[in-house]
Image (cartoon, helix red, strand yellow):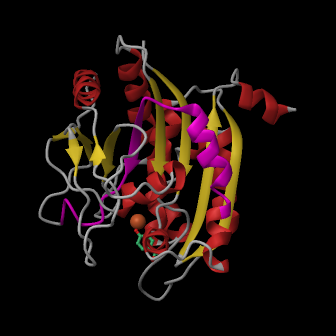
Amino acid sequence: MAKIVAGVGCSHVPAIGAAIDLGKTKEPYWSRVFSGFEHSKKWMEELKPDVAIIVYNDHATAFSVDMIPTFALGCAAEFPIADEGWGPRPVPVVQGHPELAAHIAQSVILDEFDLTIVNNMEVDHGLTVPMNLLFGNPKQDESWPCPVIPLMVNVVMYPPPTGHRCYMLGKAIRKAVESWPEDLRVVIFGTGGMSHQISGPRAGLINSDFDKAFLDGLANDPVSLTKIPHVEYMREAGAEGVEMVMWHVMRGAIDEDSVETYRFYTVPASNTAVGHIILEPKGSAAAKQAAE
Ligand code: DHB
Ligand code: FE
């Protein structure tokens, strides 16, 4: 049986990708950001997942206002890196897991949860930046450490899904993974956020109190957190803060009594508050250590 062994929450700021690609990671501004992921990269290396499901949002790259699915599951064998205006990022093409992805699509859709199946999709910073932060920086002709199933969520055009719908989708994904016969160890990422607003009179808005309460809630009271309405994310965490609904998919997919084993928070990276959390099953060695 396949199993979801851990959940990761992680911001996806595009400037983090640019800092990696332009060799700026040692500059003081950026080393502050990257220092928070040193532990996590080692942790991930030891975890050695067989597959990662990465819940992320596309930024009008593969989709646009012409057509935007609410939830789109990447079922392709590979996902090319998109050109977001400066050429594709020099990172390896993302390899998929078409068999497990097709199984998840079947299980979740027959569970009455509508997903769009995507067999051809380029991926942007929303996917690749969290991959760099957790998997390191393989060169373009190298490869990422494991296959990835991208799950794209619409948070760019109204109306995005509710936090509760995302949480319930996470539960359906967990059921799907656990009905896969092979013993795969799966890690799931919820990405985006934290507080930020990129344009308009409130551009530059950061709300650390909201972000930290969100991280606390994710660890300790995730069901209450799913009740936050969109308008509250936007009022408290800025227009793009609504990206945080994607973290609920991750939270729904992991063990309900998972515990926080690592957290990092820093402001700013570009215009954005960077948040990161690792949640692991209560019985795991890391969870026991964190409780001591
Ligand atoms: C910024 C942050 C994002 O999450 C994003 O998708 C685009 C831009 C920013 O900080 O500029
Ligand atoms: Fe974004």
Please state which of residues 164 and 8 is positioned toward the viewer in this rendering.
Answer: 8
Q: Residue at x 47, y 89 (%)?
A: 201
Is 254 part of what is drawn in magenta? no
Is 38 part of what is drawn in magenta? yes
Q: Is residue 106 above or below residue 259?
A: above
Left or right: residue 193 versus residue 168 is: right
The image shows residue 200 at horizontal and vertical percentages of 42, 86
Left or right: residue 105 versus residue 205 is: left
Ligand 1's image quarter is: bottom left
Q: Residue at x 18, y 51 (%)?
A: 121
The image shows residue 263 at horizontal and vertical percentages of 69, 50
Q: Is residue 36 visible?
A: yes
Which image quarter: residue 220? top right
**Farthest residue in the right direction?**
292
Left or right: residue 168 versus residue 226 is: left
Q: Is residue 230 visible?
A: no
Residue range of the region highlighted in magenta in the rendering: 35-64
Q: Residue at x 67, y 62 (%)?
A: 35
